[in-house]
Amino acid sequence: MPIFLADTDTDLRIIHVHGKDETTRHLRDMGVVEGANVRLLSKEGRSVILVLGGSRIALDSALASRIMVG
């Protein structure tokens, strides 16, 4: 499911990141990679704030929609 559909304050695992090469490279540079554990801290519509590796990352709806979690 897309990460913006998950419940907040939930531990999740990234199962797939899709998009153009430049988009996936940008996410990968931030640590958003398949197999990574993330916590969905908050969401507003489809925009989200994640905790990943001890850092908070804010993603707009365009980037958040590319991240599938399970």
Image (cartoon, grey):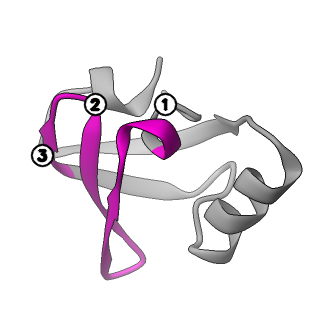
Counting residues from the N terminus, which is met first, the one under dot 3 or under dot 1?
A: 3
Q: From what the image shows, is residue 8 above or below residue 34?
A: above
* Label placed on residue 9: 3
Q: Is residue 59 left or right of residue 40?
A: right
Q: Give yes or no for residue 54 being in the magenta stretch.
A: yes
| Rendered residue at 48%/38% (across/down) | 62
Which amino acid type is marked by label 2? Answer: Arg
Query: In whole angstroms, how far apart are the C-alphas of marks 3 and 1?
Result: 18 Å
**Where does the magenta region start and end?**
41-63
Q: Position of residue 61 (x, y in %)?
A: 37, 37
- Please name the amino acid that badge 1 sits on: Ser
- Report, in whole angstroms, how far the alpha carbon at label 1 lies from the one at label 2: 7 Å
Secondary structure at badge 1 equals loop
Task: For marks 2 and 3, give the CA distance.
Answer: 15 Å
Q: Which mark is residue 65?
A: 1
Q: Position of residue 2 (x, y in %)?
A: 45, 24
Q: Residue at x 56, y 43 (%)?
A: 14
Between 62 and 38, the one lying in front of the other is 62
Element under disc 3: loop
Q: Tell me if residue 59 comes above or below residue 2 in the rendering.
A: below
The residue shown at (58%, 34%) is 66
Badge 2 density bin: few <14, some 14–19, many ≥20, Cα 10 Å = some
Q: Which residue is mark 2?
A: 46
Q: How many marks?
A: 3
Mark 1 vs 2: CB contact within 8 A: yes
Left or right: where 42 falls relative to 36: left
Which mark is first along the chain, 3 or 2? 3
Q: Mark 2 against mark 3, which lies toward the viewer?
A: 2
Q: Nearer the viewer, mark 3 or mark 1?
A: 1
